[in-house]
């Protein structure tokens, strides 16, 4: 059975084909080789249940409870969250609600295709798909290259088992690895596409990539997509793409490490008077939504957590910053005036001001289009003009 046989024409789900064609038309330009592949690859079998974000946390959605809603969700160009903290939607009780952070998802199809384009795939490419997730992206790669040229890896045994089962249902049988993708990997090939963020580049990726082969990934905590080609010395060279993506970080176990200390610092930032209190000429910024600013902050001071709060009239706003080293910021904009409270060993708001001043002075930040050099150990060096940064030392 192939993907085009996944639902019979007399099935109540046969209309997925129309929705898949519509999705393909909205996310690919005319003439794209990916248009037909998206149009004939079903997505809904990979997300029979998912977690929907609500004001009160995450709420379970079950596809069979409402087929119309299921197809509408599956064939929109958006991400569907499959796992929150340690709870996969497949295992949740009907009506379940929970709190926590996403740990697995079905990435929005347009972003998957964008990452595959950056990989410059051809019919002979052998690909390591890092971050199996639900398996939908793996299905697209199988449709493009053939199943024998695709290996997919995820740290979570249930994710690889479920993806294997669902890929089998539509006729694909790629190779599976269940392992920590940042550790040793038994794979050799000429393309690596990661839909998880890493920092540094795992040395095992470079070891498995053939000379001249290409890796495409994002730097964890940033929106930077890097493409780099394997060099004779065992490293890789390339660039930061003029594009953006945000993926979950790789994890080594069932969940991300507990963040109790960081959350405690955030709690202090909400209420304490600062060791330093001063007015700011800049408006309060939602840093997470200013992707380039957020990325530059991560390069300067990795690990800052941001929160942004608006009030009913939208005029008064509060931004919080916190780091596990105990540094914190509360910037309050009330009545058009901004007061900044800071505490801990570092003045994080000063770093933010440096980034904003550079942005205003130069008209942009230097990260997009930067040259990339990756050492055989995976350390990433970025350079554009006089600006340099090193990631993963």
Image (spheres, helix red, strand yellow):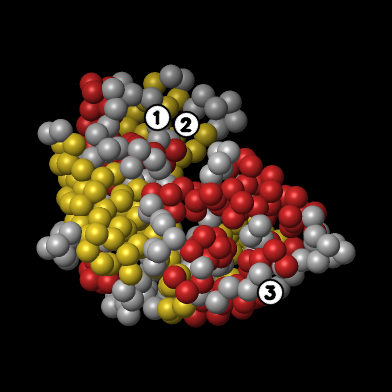
Judge left or right: residue 95 versus residue 214: right
Question: Is 350 on the left-hand or right-hand side of 101?
Answer: left
Mark 2: give few (<14), some (14-19) or many (20+) Cα within 10 Å.
many
Q: What residue do we see at 68% from left, 52% from top?
A: 20
* Residue that numbered label 1 is attached to: 284
Q: Which residue appears at 49% of the width and 27% of the height?
A: 316
Q: Which residue is mark 2?
A: 317
Residue that badge 3 annotates: 1
| Residue 44 image point, x, y percent | 68, 61
Please tell me which residue is depicted at 39% across the width and 78% down the height of the picture. Answer: 179
Q: Residues within 10 Å of mark 1 (few under 14, many from 20)?
A: many
Dot placed on the residue nearer the N-terminal end, 2 or 3? 3
Q: Which residue lies most toward the front here?
A: 123
Q: Secondary structure at mark 3?
A: loop
Q: Nearer the viewer, residue 358 or 114?
A: 114
Q: Are marks 2 and 1 in contact (CB under 8 Å)?
A: yes
């Amino acid at each position: 059975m192939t993907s085009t046989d996944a639902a019979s024409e007399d099935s109540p789900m046969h209309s997925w084909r129309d929705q898949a064609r519509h999705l393909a038309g909205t996310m690919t330009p005319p003439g794209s080789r990916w248009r037909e592949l998206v149009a004939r690859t079903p997505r809904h079998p990979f997300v029979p249940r998912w977690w929907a974000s609500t004001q009160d946390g995450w709420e379970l959605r079950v596809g069979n409870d409402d087929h119309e809603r299921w197809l509408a969700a599956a064939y929109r160009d958006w991400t569907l969250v499959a796992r929150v903290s340690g709870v996969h939607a497949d295992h949740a009780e009907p009506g379940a609600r929970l709190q926590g952070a996403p740990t697995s998802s079905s990435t929005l199809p347009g972003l998957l295709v964008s990452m595959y384009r950056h990989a410059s795939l051809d019919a002979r490419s052998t690909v390591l798909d890092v971050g199996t997730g639900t398996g939908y992206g793996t299905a697209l790669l199988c449709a493009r290259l053939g199943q024998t040229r695709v290996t997919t890896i995820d740290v979570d045994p249930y994710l690889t088992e479920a993806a294997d089962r669902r890929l089998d249902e539509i006729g694909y049988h790629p190779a599976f690895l269940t392992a920590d993708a940042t550790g040793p990997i038994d794979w050799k090939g000429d393309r690596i596409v990661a839909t998880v963020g890493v920092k540094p580049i795992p040395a095992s990726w470079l070891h498995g990539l053939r000379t001249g082969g290409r890796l495409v990934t994002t730097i964890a905590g940033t929106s930077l997509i890097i493409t780099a080609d394997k060099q004779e010395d065992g490293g890789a060279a390339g660039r930061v793409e003029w594009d953006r993506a945000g993926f979950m970080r790789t994890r080594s176990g069932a969940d991300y490490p507990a963040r109790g200390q960081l959350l405690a610092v955030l709690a202090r930032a909400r209420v304490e008077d600062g060791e330093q209190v001063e007015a700011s000429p800049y408006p309060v910024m939602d840093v997470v939504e200013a992707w380039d600013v957020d990325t530059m902050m991560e390069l300067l001071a990795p690990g800052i957590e941001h929160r942004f709060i608006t009030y009913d009239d939208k005029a008064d706003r509060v931004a919080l910053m916190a780091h596990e080293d105990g540094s914190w910021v509360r910037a309050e904009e009330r009545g058009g005036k901004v007061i900044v409270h800071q505490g801990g060993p570092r003045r994080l708001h000063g770093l933010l001001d440096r980034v904003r001043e550079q942005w205003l002075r130069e008209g942009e930040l230097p990260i997009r289009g930067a040259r990339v050099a990756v050492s055989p150990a995976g350390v990433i060096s970025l350079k554009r003009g006089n600006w340099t940064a090193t990631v993963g030392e």
